[in-house]
Amino acid sequence: MKKLENKIALVTSSTRGIGLAIAERIGDNGAKVYLAVRRPEAGREIANKIIAKGGNADVVYFDAKKPETYKTMIREVIEKDKRLDILVNNYGGTDVKVDLDVVNGNEDEFFRIVKDNLQSVYLPSKEAIPYMIKNGGGSIINISTIGSVIPDLSRVAYVVSKAAINSLTQNIAIQYARDKIRCNAVLPGFIATDSAKDNMSEEFLNAFLKHVPLNRAGEAEDIANAVVFYASDDSSYITGNLLEVAGGFGIPTPLFGDSIRK
Ligand code: NAP
């Protein structure tokens, strides 16, 4: 029996990058996975590939710029399958041109980005939790960032919003633990997806990797593996956890990058 057999899952923003890897890995592990995406045709193609591999998948419409779709995407799943066991809140991001340090960043954009990211966990969780309670439990997994626990020189709106997501993760975990709902967050380090590569120069990436003890960029699959762990009964006694999947970034002495032999 596969780890997620008979489960119903939803992954936001799963056409590319980390979300795509999560949806595929959840499909491989036996759950029916709903791709919650703003481009339904692209979602349909991915769903068909998952089905062709022997999995089960479907598409629901979600656009983060239309916050009402956080609710409608959950309701669509409930209408079709009567339950939702696994909710993966993967959508998130920023605009590096305006999300700078406190003084130089745009004030209106700061609050817009914080709201955009924070509601990507708050709204779908608010909608899904009552259905999970009715069905005897569930697992919510939020995609945060290692930057949420290591202050940086820029992207203040992004990292503050993700720090808030960490706190929301732990509050949800505590508030609904007695309803058998677990809620955990995965904190990726640098993962070589389109948006991450577009936001960094080659020079910055090389300097950054000097400080990553495992000395490589992460793969989207590294995050997907952690998500499947939290989605499955392998983590049945774990809730409110913030798991860094970052190759050890931020753990060693700040001199690590200068003193390492190779
Ligand atoms: P990505 O490769 O750039 O993929 C972005 C995804 O978001 C695509 O599926 C895209 O859909 C979707 N999307 C963009 N705008 C949307 C909207 N308005 N409504 C719905 N979907 C939208 O991103 P990623 O790097 O995988 O990031 C995924 C998550 O991981 C984010 O929460 C991010 O903060 C977090 N994270 C990433 C890294 C990293 O190094 N990559 C590190 C830490 C945390 P389309 O295909 O339709 O454009």
Image (tube, grey):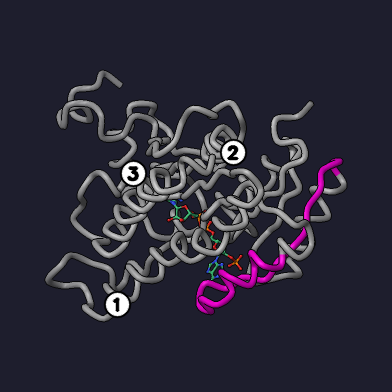
Q: Secondary structure at mark 1?
A: helix
Mark 2–mark 3 CB contact (< 8 Å): no
Q: Residues within 10 Å of mark 1 (few under 14, many from 20)?
A: some
Q: Indicate if the residue with disc 3 has its beta carbon within 8 Å of ligand 1.
A: yes
The label number, if any, that marks residue 109 in the structure image: 1
The image position of residue 205, as x and y in percent, is: 35, 46
Task: Determine the image quadrant of residue 216.
Answer: top left
Residue at x 67%, y 71% (from the top left corner): 61
Mark 1–mark 2 CB contact (< 8 Å): no
Q: Residues within 10 Å of mark 3 (few under 14, many from 20)?
A: many
**Relative vertical location of residue 195 with respect to residue 68 in this rendering, above or below:** above
The image position of residue 83, as x and y in percent, is: 70, 54
Distance (Cα) linking label 1 and label 3: 22 Å
Q: Amino acid at mark 1?
A: Glu
- Residue 7 belongs to magenta span: no
Q: Amino acid at mark 2?
A: Ala
Residue at x 25%, y 29% (from the top left corner): 251
The label number, if any, that marks residue 231 in the structure image: 2
- Residue 74 belongs to magenta span: yes
The quadrant in which the C terminus is found is: top left
Q: Indicate if the residue with disc 1 has its beta carbon within 8 Å of ligand 1.
A: no
Q: Secondary structure at mark 2?
A: helix
Label 3 belongs to which residue?
146
Residue at x 64%, y 54% (from the top left corner): 10
Give whichever of 138, 192 is nearer the camera: 138
Distance (Cα) linking label 1 and label 2: 33 Å
Looking at the image, residue 52 sits to the left or right of residue 198; the answer is right
- Magenta residues (range): 53-76
